[in-house]
DNA sequence: GTCTATATTGGGATAGAC
DNA sequence: GTCTATCCCAATATAGAC
């Protein structure tokens, strides 16, 4: 499992692009972080341009997230949980928060470099949102159908996921908790709102 | 109301910084957009650096939003509306969406340039979030106290605003509606979730 | 595969005329 | 207050030795 120079360049790109942006990251810095001599053209042995690296970073990161989402070692929802129960929903919401945590660098890159590579936003949107979030939102909406209101719409699931995304991004952008409310309290309130405060 | 060159530079900065970032915007472009000769140092008569302009842009934008939020010509909530009623809540949520719309350039800038100027995030967080959103979230939570559950916590208001923020940012980042659900349907689902589908 | 050295350029910034 | 002209540097990119 020795990390190749190419891997280390990808790591360097992910970290630097997320925090300082592509334009804010000189190629020299990528070389240093990857253990190459500062100022040497070593970078160009692996990527033609910074945009080239950017695209590779995004693709690898999407695959990583998709892989860990389907990771069999990941804690599975307890089969004994009743879909739509309070504990089930708390688990779902917590998982969504964890996913947002692991997506943080990718989201930071997306926010900055959206227009830099044609189809980059569409790529992320298609793979992660359309596939992952869409399915999750449908699962939640379906399970909630009994608890809230049958209707066949995914909208309740969308509301739930949007709330998680909004809370997480606000915290990420402003640092700390902008609402003055911690994550645990937020999750409780969200679940209360959906199920009512004295659901099973 | 003749717009000064300084004003036009601020306009140019807002538009270009929001779409292409500070690093992606050469000073030449700012000069052109402001009607100055391309390549002339005209920019420097008004701002010392691009970061200087960035800070001025953010400050002006915050003041503008604060001013229009308190604008007396803005449609006021109908006094006949019962706080906590369905129509009242729809109105609140719609207002929050409108605010997000008008904040779009500022949010785009914040997402990119957060770390560029010390205290920029804190500035926006303090003025807009702490003051505006915090108060709104408390208003909603208080009004909902009767409809949902008395408890004294702002959390339900925070959930509501977070959902709006999450939906809006997702649409902004991915283009179109990532959830496959339109804004109207989303608002309906959000209000249903909070009040129940057959509230007054 | 990685280094030293260097060519090239895009863009930030200034001087001084008008 | 705006222009022309120019300096300067940081960063991309390449050539060629090891």
Image: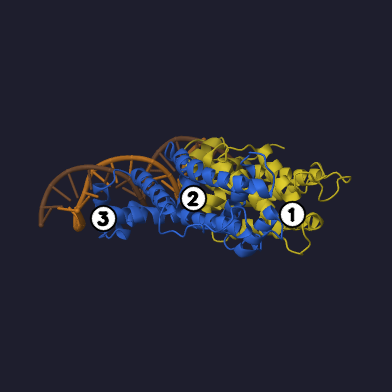
Chain colours: A blue, B yellow, C orange, D brown
Q: On the image, numbered disc 3 is attached to which residue?
A: A5
Q: Where's residue D3, x and y in %?
A: 50, 35
Q: On the image, numbered disc 1 is attached to which residue?
A: B136
**Which SS class for mark 1?**
helix
Whether B97 is drawn above or below A28: the answer is above
Q: Earlier in the sequence, mark 3 or mark 2?
A: 3
Q: Where's residue B35, x and y in %?
A: 56, 35
Q: Is residue A78 left or right of residue B96?
A: left
Q: Residue visible at 79% across and 62% down?
A: B150
Alpha carbon of mark 2 to alpha carbon of mark 1: how far? 27 Å
Query: Quarter of the image holding residue A5?
Result: bottom left
Alpha carbon of mark 3 to alpha carbon of mark 2: how far? 25 Å
Dividing the image into 4 quarters, which one contains the C terminus of chain B? top right
Mark yes or no: residue B121 visible. Answer: no
Nearer-the-camera pick, C7 or A91: A91
Nearer-the-camera pick, B170 or A98: A98
Dividing the image into 4 quarters, which one contains the N terminus of chain B? top right
Q: Is residue B52 left or right of residue A180?
A: left
Query: Quarter of the image holding residue A97?
Result: bottom right
**Which SS class for mark 2?**
helix
Q: Where's residue C11, x and y in %?
A: 43, 44
Q: Where's residue B102, x and y in %?
A: 66, 43
Q: Do dots 3 and 2 share one subunit?
A: yes
Structural crowding at the residue carrying mark 2, measured as other residues with C-alpha within 10 Å and reported as few (<14), some (14–19) or many (≥20) = some
Label 1 lies in what chain? B
Q: What label does residue A107 carry, if any?
A: 2
Give the residue at the far front of this rendering.
A80
Label 2 lies in what chain? A
């Amino acid at each position: 499992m020795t990390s190749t120079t190419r891997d280390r360049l990808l790591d360097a790109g992910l970290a630097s692009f997320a925090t300082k942006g592509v334009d804010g990251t000189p190629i020299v810095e990528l070389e240093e972080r990857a253990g190459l001599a500062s100022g040497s053209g070593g970078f160009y042995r692996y990527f033609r341009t910074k945009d080239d690296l950017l695209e590779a970073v995004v693709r690898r990161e999407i695959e990583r997230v998709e892989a860990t989402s389907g990771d069999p070692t990941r804690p599975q929802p307890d089969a004994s949980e009743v879909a739509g129960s309070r504990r089930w929903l708390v688990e779902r919401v917590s998982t969504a928060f964890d996913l947002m945590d692991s997506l943080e660098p990718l989201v930071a890159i997306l926010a900055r470099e959206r227009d830099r590579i044609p189809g980059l936003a569409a790529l992320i949107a298609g793979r992660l949102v359309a596939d992952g979030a869409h399915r999750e939102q449908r699962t939640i909406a379906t399970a909630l159908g009994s608890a809230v209101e049958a209707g066949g719409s995914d909208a309740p699931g969308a509301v739930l996921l949007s709330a998680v995304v909004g809370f997480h991004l606000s915290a990420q952008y402003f640092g700390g908790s902008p609402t003055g409310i911690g994550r645990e309290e937020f999750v409780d309130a969200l679940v209360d709102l959906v199920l009512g405060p004295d659901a099973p």
